[in-house]
Each structure stands twice: as C-alpha cells, then as structure tokens.
Image (tube, coloured by chain):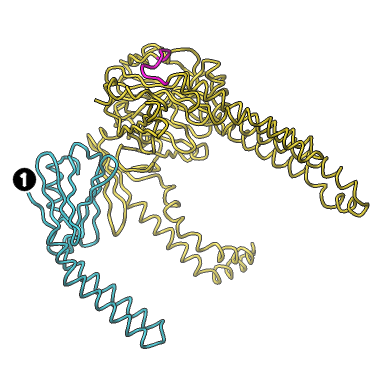
Amino acid sequence: MYHEHKLRILRYSMKNIWMLIFPFLRGLSVWTFDPAGIYAWIRGAWLDIAVLGIILLYGYIRWYCSRITITDDAIIHTEGCFVVIERTIPFESISVSSTERVFYLIPLKATILRCETRAGFFKSTDLSLMVSDSLGREIMSNIPGIDHKNKIKNIPEPDIKSIMLFSVFFSSGFSGAVYIATFFFKGGEITRDIIELSLSRITETTEMIYSRLLIGIPKIAVITGLFFLSAWFLSFFMNVTRYARFRISADRRYYDIVCGLFKRRRYKIKVQHINYTDIRQNIIMKLCRAFSVNISCPGYGSNSYLPVLIPLRNGDSIGGEFWSDGVVLDEKPQYRPKKSAFVSYAGIPAILTVIMPVLYRLAERLFPDTGELIVFIFIMAEIPCIWFTAVKTVALNTTGLSVYGDKIVIRCSKWTSFHTVIAKKNHIALIQIKQNIFQKFFRKCSVVIWLNGESKSRYTIKSLSEKIINECELFN
Amino acid sequence: MKIFKPDKNALVSMQIIVVSASVLFLIAARMYIPVNIIVVIIAAALLTIVIFLNCIYLPLYFDYLSYEADDEKITKHSGVIFKSDKTVKYSTVQYSAVVRTPFSKYTGLNFAVLFVYGGQLRLMFLNMDDIAELRKASSSL
C-alpha cells in the first residue's frame, strides 16, 4: 500500500487555506524581527495559527486516507476520511495511462499520474494522482505496455523542423490571426486618414477636437492587431514546448509516446481502445503533401493538447510496418460526389466571390468620399470568399467514403480543414442519411457518420448519389 | 440468477436522516424567522414532506429496488412512479467504485458504481456482503 506524494497535503489543505488570507495579511503588517515583537505577534495571532494548523492537519488526514494499492491485475485507490470511496481500475480496462513531470515538480521528485478508461461520457479523468517518481514508475511498469522484443521498427520520428511546422499549422489559426491583424493595422490607418480628411474640412474647432480625441484610433488598431499576432505567437510557443522531443515507440498492442519540454508527458495507449484515426490537413498542407495523424482515444488529447500520433509527415504513406492496415491513402474514394455537386460544396463562397466586386461598385457610388476604405473592406471580404471557394473545390474532389474489409475511410472537410478518418466498422455509433428537397429532386443525399468517442465525432459527406444506399455494404 | 435486495437498515437510516434534516431545518427557521405564522407554515410543510417520504415514497422505493445478477449481467429495478430497469453486461464494465459511509455496517448506506461505456450504473443501499458477492460474480467490483 502506498500514499500519494506529500505535496498533496498542500493541495488537500488548499481548499480551506484561502480563509486565512486576510488574517495572514493583517498579521504580516504588524510583523517585527524583535523577539519581544515576535512574542507579541504570536500572542495576537494564536487563533489564526491554530486555524492554519487545523487546516493543515485536515489536509494531512485526507492525504493519509488516500491510499494506493497495486494488485496483480488492478490499481485500487481509496480516498476519504468519513465517506470512503474505493476505486478499482483493472489494468486491462485502462485505455491511456500517463505520467506528467512538470519542471517545478522535478526537484520535489513528484509526478502526476493519470489513468483513463472508456467509461463515462465526458472528457474527465478516471484516476489522477500525484505520486513520487519511484511510485509512478512502479505503477506504470505494472500497467501493460509495449513489448520491447516485438517493437515495430522504422516508425517515423518527427524532427525539430516538423514540430515547428506542425506548430505553425495548428497554432490557433495562423492565417486567421494574420488576417485579423492586417484588418486592424491597415483598416485603422485608413480610417484615421479618412476621419482626418473629413474633419479638417469642417472647422478649426473640429480639428482641435480631432487632435485631442481621435488621435488614438490607429493606436487601438495597432494594439488589437498586435494582440492577435501575440496570441498566435503564444499559441505557437506553447505548441512547440508541448510537442518538442516527441518520441513514439509501438508494438501491435500498445503505443508509447513521450513529448514536451517543460511538461514531460509519457502516454501508454492501448491500440484496441482507439476509436478512430484522423489524418488532418489544411489546403497548404495538401499542396505540400503533408499531413498530421491524430487518434481518438479516451484520455489522449484535451482542449489544449491535440491527440497527435504523428505530428507532421510528408509523403503518401504513414510509415511502413507501423501502418500496414490495408488502407491506401492516395486512392480515390469508392463513393464520392459528382462534379455537378459544386453548388452544394462551394456554391455560397463562389457566389459571394462573384458578387463582391458588384457590391464594391455599388458602395463606391453611394459613398464616394470613402473610396480607399471601401477598397480595403472589399479586399478583406473577398480574401475569405476566394479561400473558401478554393477549399471547398478541393473538398469536392477529395471527399468520399470507402470500405476496406472491416474498416471504413471517410474523407471530408470541416471549415478549412480536411479529414481522412479511418475507423473500424464496429466503432460506428450511428449512420444518418439526410435528404433535403433539392437533394430529393436530384436523387442525392448526405451521409452523416457518428463514431464512438468521448466527444462529438460526426463526419458528413454531402451530395452522394442516392444509389449508395443500395450499393454500399455499410447500409445493408 | 440471484436477486439482491437493499439492506433493511438502509430504509430506517434514510427515514432517520429525513426526520433529522427536517428538525434541523425547522430549528434554523425558528431561530432566523421572527414571524411565527411563517414558521408554522414551514413546520406544516415539513411535516407533510416527512410523512410523504417516510410513510409512502421511501417504503415503496425500497420495496421495488432490487438487483438481479447472473453470470453475464446485472439488472437494476427501481422507481416509484416511473419504473425503470437498467441492465449492464459485466463485459462492458470498465471499472468500479465502492462508497462506504460511517457505520455503514449498521446503517446499510453503501453504494457501488459500475462505470461502463458512456455511463454508469449505481447500485444503492447494498450491504457489504452483497457487494462482495457481486464482486466475485463480476470479478470487477
């Protein structure tokens, strides 16, 4: 039987320790180094010290009651003083076990250990413990992992260049941040020029008001623009530190992933518990034939961490023996929309792209004084329309559904990203076939496939022929 | 197949908890509400709730609450107004938790939770011997 790391006492006490913040500040303000002063201080603050002692004692009792037992086939965690909760997690049920060594915990030899199973509905951790390094290693050695004798060779190892590129592509929308920053930099400048020009025409008084009040407009624009760029750089930096020194080793049953610079994380992933594999690309990555391989597995990935298996890879295959699942990535989908489905894919952005110059001409006539501003606004509005038209045109040519034995491959796009999802048939939760009035007329339908997963995993393939219902074995 | 019924002491414990909570609430109302008529109304409402819970709802709830276990699955029958039957296969159980309250041997306030794909099954008011037997049957509890 083991206990958690002693640092946990503070964590258990922390819930109540905030109550002492004001007495502590009050006591600190009258603190002196004079022995008589210290005695007087203790006399005055004895009640606060006693309460602090009780809180720490309560934390200690809670820590003492938190016990970890390792049996041959399960980890048992008991917690609680009055109401005792005993959690038994069989090793075989663990989908992902992980250890996290944060840089400030290294001198204290503490590790955060997490175990996650397929149970539950939200992304909540089934077991999270702060343990000593040695206990963390012992627990991890008891949880089944890769067999080093049968390790798969030639697994693609990401280098620093691919990690940097991956961070560029997946850092909170690089193109979006640049676009918004440009909007504020340039838009602010033009707005200032126009306001300056308009006001200088009126009166001297107005000019005085302008010089006093409106001089700040470009500054705000610059600050907002800088804010978005800084936010992106911060996201980029976080991603680089999260995925730096990314190493993966695997056998047929388990993956072992280690990554992170300041927070060194190690994951043991049970392959059998992976719901599906998601190969992600954006249009630039598609042009460069690059892709990122993600997996959906309970406990791997969160809001801030992408569930990455291979951060970035270039080429047509994921990597020799590592990916011999009989799925050919470069092959055309078996069931795909026809070219005539252009309207349902890229119709709206294409129409907006065409309409935008017409609207520009109209606005130019209605507001002749604001010519430069209108040019800028319409250029900025035209860029996303062209971008979306390009993305959805590519999506039309790549979207589709394939069935390979017991696996399905879904190729589709969500906003500006492209997904190639590979899942076993028995991981399909629901298949929906949707038809609106136009699709009914043109004998088309949309197929929505829901896959097993802790969060919503829904993929839609639009404008497939109605015949798919009879032809594809998935629907029979 | 074996049928597990909730611990008989649990019904009495729950009835005592309901009465104690009502008395505490009434004392608090008496101390902090100066208007007598409001206190009387609260007392009447509490008395109605206590009578309803202790004499009607809880006995019916405990009467219908039962668990059927065989080699493959466990089924929970519960509900007073709306009856519900929930079945969980042992093979889908990922892990389990047992919650023990103070003096649970005498109060019968033990709970076991089976965590399965996408949800959980709560086994309430079983005594520890029954939980141990289910542990043997399912080898997961």
The residue at which mark 1 appears reads as B1
- Secondary structure under tag 1 reads loop
| Residue at 17%, 39% in the rendered image | B90
Query: In the depicted view, which residue is nearer to us: A58 or A374?
Result: A374
Where is the N terminus of chain A found, in terms of image quarters?
Answer: top left
Corner quadrant of residue A377:
top right
Chain drawn yellow in the picture: A
Chain drawn cyan in the picture: B
- Inspect the magenta stretch and tell me whether residue A330 lies in it: yes
Q: Position of residue A420 (x, y in %)?
A: 42, 23
The answer to whether one can see residue A264 in this image is yes
- Examine the rendered structure and indicate whether residue A33 appears above or below residue B54: above
The answer to whether one can see residue A70 in this image is no
Q: In the displayed structure, does residue A198 sit left or right of residue A413? A: right
- Examine the rendered structure and indicate whether residue A275 appears above or below residue A26: above
- Examine the rendered structure and indicate whether residue B35 appears above or below residue A109: below
Magenta span: chief secondary structure: loop
| Residue that lies at the very extreme toward the right in this rendered image | A204
Corner quadrant of residue B13:
bottom left
Q: Position of residue A435 (x, y in %)?
A: 37, 33
| Residue that lies at the very extreme toward the bottom in this rendered image | B36
Give the residues drawn in magenta, as a range.
A329-337
Corner quadrant of residue A338:
top left
Within-10-Å neighbours for mark 1: few <14, some 14–19, many 20+: few
Where is the C terminus of chain A found, in terms of image quarters?
Answer: top left
Q: Position of residue B120 (x, y in %)?
A: 26, 46
